[in-house]
Image (cartoon, grey):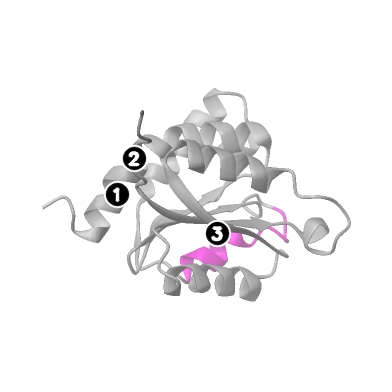
Amino acid sequence: MEMAPPQIGRALVVIVDDRVSHGEREDSIGPLVTELLEEARLVVDASVVVPGDPVAIRNALNTAVIGGVDLVVTVGGTGVSPRDVTADATAGVLDRPIPGIAEAIRASGLAAGAVDAGLSRGLVGVSGSTLVVNLAPSRAAVRDGMATLTPLVAHVIAELSGLDD
C-alpha cells in the first residue's frame, strides 16, 4: 500500500473580487488555487471571497493569521486601478515583508506573458507565523505565481514553525 506524502501545512485562499463577492459572477480562480495548493501538499481550510475593500481584505487576512494557517494566498486587487487595494491592505498586516519572493513572482509572470503578474503591486511577507502572498488574478498569473511559490513554501513554513533547527 502506497502512502501519500505528508502534508506540509494549512492554507486559506482569499479571492478579492467585487463581482464575485456580490454574486454577479462565479469564482473560477479559487478552485484553481485550491487545486494547486493541494498538489503542493497543503490542506486548504477554505476559499473565501471578499470585495476590493481594505477593511474586508484585512479582516480576511487577520482571520487567517489568528486561525493559525501556515499560508494565505490572496488573488486579485493587485493592479494599479483605484479599486486595486489588496497590496495596501496586506502591508498593514505584515510583520516582515519578503520582497524577494514577490519580485520573483512578478519577474516569472512577466516572462511567461502574464502582464497582470508583471504589473502587480502584490506583496509577500510574514504575519505572525503565517506566510501571506498576493497574486494577480488571471489564470496565467496564478499558475505561474504558484509554480514560483510552491518550491519555497515548505522551507518558509518550516522556518516559521521552528522545525528547521
Compared across the picture, whether 73 is left or right of 101 comes to right
Q: Are marks 2 and 1 in contact (CB under 8 Å)?
A: yes
Residue 151 image position (x, y, % from top left): 36, 35
Q: Which mark is residue 88?
A: none
Q: Which range of residues does the magenta coloring cover? A: 81-92
Secondary structure, mark 3, is helix
Q: How many residues crowd around disc 1 within 10 Å: few (fewer than 14), some, or many (20 or more)?
A: some
CA gap, disc 3 to disc 2? 21 Å
Residue 85 image position (x, y, % from top left): 63, 62
Disc nearer the start of the sequence (3/2): 3
Which residue is denoted by mark 2 in the rendering? Answer: 152
Looking at this view, name the residue that lies furthest to the front.
1
Which residue is denoted by mark 1 in the rendering? Answer: 156
Residue 64 image position (x, y, % from top left): 49, 67
Three-letter amino acid code at disc 2?
A: Leu
CA gap, disc 2 to disc 1? 6 Å
Compared across the picture, whether 83 is left or right of 103 comes to right
Residue 17 image position (x, y, % from top left): 73, 57
Secondary structure, mark 2, is helix
Which residue is denoted by mark 3 in the rendering? Answer: 87
Q: How many residues crowd around disc 2 within 10 Å: few (fewer than 14), some, or many (20 or more)?
A: few
Residue at 36%, 28% (x, y): give it.
2
Indicate whether residue 165 is drawn in magenta: no
Three-letter amino acid code at disc 3?
A: Ala
User: In the rendered image, is residue 104 in sight?
Assistant: no
Three-letter amino acid code at disc 1?
A: Val
Indicate whether residue 85 is drawn in magenta: yes
The quadrant of the picture occupied by the N terminus is top left
Compared across the picture, whether 42 is left or right of 110 comes to left
